[in-house]
Image (cartoon, rainbow, N blue to C red):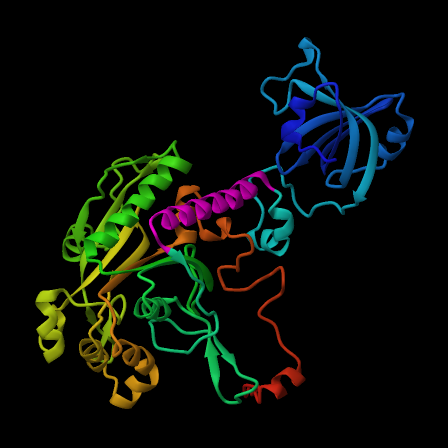
Amino acid sequence: MRTYIKNLKERIDKNVTIMGWVDVRRDQGKMIFFDIRDVTGRVQGVVLPNSKEALEVGSAVRSEWIVKVEGVVGKRPDNAIQKDKENGEIELNILKIEVLSKAETNPFDIKTDGKEVSEDIRLQYRYIDLKRERMNKNIRSRHNLLHFVRNFYTENDFVEIETPCITKSTPEGARDYIIPSRLYKGNFYALPQSPQQYKQLLMVGGVERYFQIAKCFRDEDTRGDRQPEFTQIDIEMSFVEQEDVMKINENLITELVKEIYPEKEIQEVPFPRLSYKEAMEKYGTDRPDLRKDKSNDNLLALCWVIDFPFFEKREDGGWTFTHNPFSAPMSKYEDNLLKKERIEDILASQYDMVLNGYEIGGGGIRNHNPKSLRSVFEIMGYEDDEIELNFGHILKAFSYGVPPHGGFAFGFDRLLMILQNEPNIREVIAFPKTGEGRDLMMDAPSRVSSNQLKDLAIKIEKKEK
């Protein structure tokens, strides 16, 4: 039976079997020393001269080979204890070594933090880069946060529901990734930019409190805190006002930091609140960094930015939404919206959470009045047939009765990036794309066969030189 390395201290003078990677091999003639690691830790083992079979196998073993090792756990003599080293008070007397898998020499050193290595090379060999201690810690912290989030919302009576990843293309702000249909040639699905419409339809369906760890996809220019596909902590709640939604998500962050990042300090609780107007006038941004000491990596300055303008001018002079077309106006601007008057003055029931100069989440109270929602689309310049084509499904659903509702979504990768003190979200995603949206490990995007294109009735036109 396998013993994890973290449990070897409990097995003094016992025979054990461990499995893992050879971290370091040191051949000292009649003896061979190994540092072996598994997912739980590291331990030093030694093959003594009387273990001839183990010496023979061990002499051929190299770093990063994967081995099964049988031996006896022993205490080190007092003068050999290494208190500053993991498992420095024990040593494994290796009796047998079985090679489970050989390994080529790594293309780079995994014992460093990796910042000296070209990111393109690290992403090309991501499966090797993930062995690095810093990356392993980031991925495990990702799990811990997701586990905490699931428990938090579940304990607050939310239901986790998965929504489709193949849906309808609708204008929601960014470009869609579209998927051609083989069965319905000339028609396309889209990958969801967010679960926005589905979660609102769940409110029509009487769910009341929904959450999801959702994959989202946006075909937009990338940057350090953005990826073509990303993870969103998504929630929606019925029969709530703005204060209710803000409160529960503020509680999530404060409890999460306390539980998982006790070394970090939240600068101010409750989080201070700034209107959009105040933030822009005072800081020149709606994502202000309010830290009193920006040199302290463990200081978290959170705030809310509220009272956003509903609409903003497009370059062509028309109107578009600032956050979300499904938001409700603040009650005092309801008439302006319905009459389409003084559009520039309309404020929406929208709110962003900002952390150390990054927007980590945002949401709003939704417009559950079909007539008012239609007015939003009309202000944005949609004709009746376009409204029906793009949004007819949700307007129809709302005609069957929809409770007042609102929601919120965290950019999970961005939140984790900040909490882990990383420079970009690629460091906290197991298999990210490059800053240009390429997957160097899988060599994607890539061409597909002519037969696949033929099945989809798609023809690739070559650009004229």
Tell me the chief SS of the magenta region. Answer: helix
Q: Is residue 4 magenta?
A: no
Instruction: Provide the residue span drawn in magenta.
Output: 132-158
Q: Is residue 141 magenta?
A: yes
Q: Position of residue 271 (x, y in %)?
A: 23, 43
Residue 416, relative to residue 216: is it above or below? above
Q: Position of residue 433 (x, y in %)?
A: 53, 60
Q: Position of residue 148 (x, y in %)?
A: 42, 44
Image quadrant containing the N terminus: top right
The answer to whether residue 115 is visible is: no
Give residue 105's quadrant in the image: top right
Residue 318, relative to residue 108: is it above or below? below
Q: Residue at x 23, y 57 (%)?
A: 351
Residue 18, relative to residue 209: is it above or below? above
Image quadrant containing the C terminus: bottom right
Q: Residue at x 35, y 67 (%)?
A: 202
Give residue 409's quadrant in the image: bottom left
The answer to whether residue 435 is visible is: yes
Q: Nearer the viewer, residue 456 or 445?
A: 456
Give residue 33's quadrant in the image: top right
Q: Nearer the viewer, residue 193 or 246?
A: 246
Q: Nearer the viewer, residue 409 or 149?
A: 149
